[in-house]
Amino acid sequence: MVRSGVNGPLHGVRIVELAGLGPGPFAGMVLADLGAEVIRVDRPDRDLIVPDPDRPDLGPSRRNPWDVLNRNRPAIRIDLALQEGAALVRDLMERADVVIEGFRPGVAERLGLGPGEICERNPRLVYGRVTGWGRDGPLADRGGHDLNYLALAGVLSHVGRLGEPPTPPLNLVADFGGGGMLLAVGVLAALVERSVSGLGQVVDAAMVDGSALLMAPLFGAWASGFWSPERGTNLLDSGAPFYDCYRCGDGGWMAVAAIEPKFFAELVRGTGLDSRWLELQHDRSLWPDLRNELSDRFSTRTRDAWTEVFSGMDACVTPVLDMGEAVEHAHAVERKAFVDVDGVAQPAPAPRFDRTPSGPVEPACSGDDPTEVLGAWGVDAPRVRTLLEDRVLG
């Protein structure tokens, strides 16, 4: 898959992605969605295909629509442990505007692919790196996962209900928000600066740093004494009864986020609560009573019935949808917020641009033609054939 003629604000920007897990591929997806020409360098033993006996067209060397994180860019399997493989990637980096990698500190250098050597050969290169703990500090060489970074960044302690253990918020915060998205932002900032200086630079994105950064306003609230250290007692952590989720009569859920008085007034009206609550919304001593009353009210109707009640009201009350339902919601449908790629519904590229919109989404593929993909980057066909014969390319 060579994406030619693709629109997007990053059209013309060339990126080499040394494939990994989580934040690196997420940054690669975001940048490719925005029109960059990304080539993903995979391990030779990586299996990108999810077998499906009902889809014979999705066998080896075919499209893999389930691999949403690796969409919109071709994959080339290169054995970086071989000198010829590392040399090929160095040549690609010389032709690139950006490199992104998510290895542990020191791995890229041992492969001869670190920024020291590469940036000397290509001074305009923006070299983006994402790690869990950062490239220095006592934990730099340790392993970790999203939950560990949240734990030490001061995030996880504040996620969950009163009296319950901290709750893992999927792996959205450290992996994708604090890691992948922060890396993409750093790369874009470095590209803007390069337009002035003419020089690239190294971007060091750490998931533990990004997780803390996402908590910036709450650190201020903590320092001021506004935010309690006791989980599940604050305005936004399920402590407030008007900012929480309520089970409906059919087992579905409604999300209530009626913080401001005008929204709370609509919540009171829609649920039929006594109007006395309009003056008592922020009386914390009465929050348990308000929560009980709201729980009782929502339990009397189905989720769809409550959705209908609040559909014409500006109350900040919405149904809790699963992924399948979210795709079909009228708002998402009208905005074309999701796209269907080979039968797999997935988020459309975002944000949106009026002059340089992103192009159509292409699924990940495990068997892109190395001659075609590398040829687009200036690698001649005889060299590709030799690399294939020597099993440097998978």
Image (cartoon, helix red, strand yellow):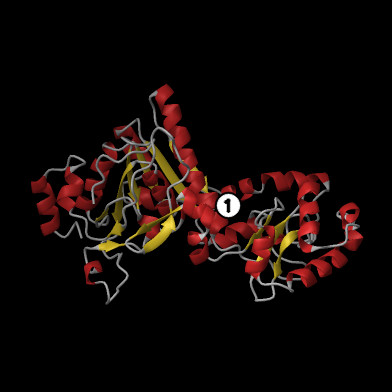
Q: In this view, does 22 lie above or below 118?
A: below
Whether residue 9 sits left or right of residue 381 in the image: it is right
- Nearest the viewer among 219 and 251 is 251
Where is residue 346? Give x, y as percent.
42, 58
Question: Is residue 135 visible in this depiction of the protein?
Answer: no
What residue is drawn where x is 23% and y is 63%?
62
Where is residue 298? Give x, y as percent.
74, 69
Whether residue 165 sits left or right of residue 383 in the image: it is right
In the picture, residue 49 is in which quadrant? bottom left
- Nearest the viewer among 76 and 368 is 368
Where is residue 257? Give x, y as percent.
72, 55
What residue is drawn where x is 61% and y is 65%?
168
**Count of residue discs:** 1
What residue is drawn where x is 63% and y is 63%?
319
| Callout 1 amino acid | Val
Name the outermost residue toward the left.
382
Whether residue 282 sits left or right of residue 102 in the image: it is right
- Nearest the viewer among 230 and 18 is 230
Where is residue 94? Give x, y as percent.
27, 37
Whether residue 110 sits left or right of residue 179 in the image: it is left
Question: For mark 1, what is the residue?
Answer: 208
Q: Residues within 10 Å of mark 1 (few under 14, many from 20)?
A: many
Question: Is residue 335 visible in this depiction of the protein?
Answer: yes
**Element type at mark 1:** helix
What residue is drawn where x is 62% and y is 45%?
213
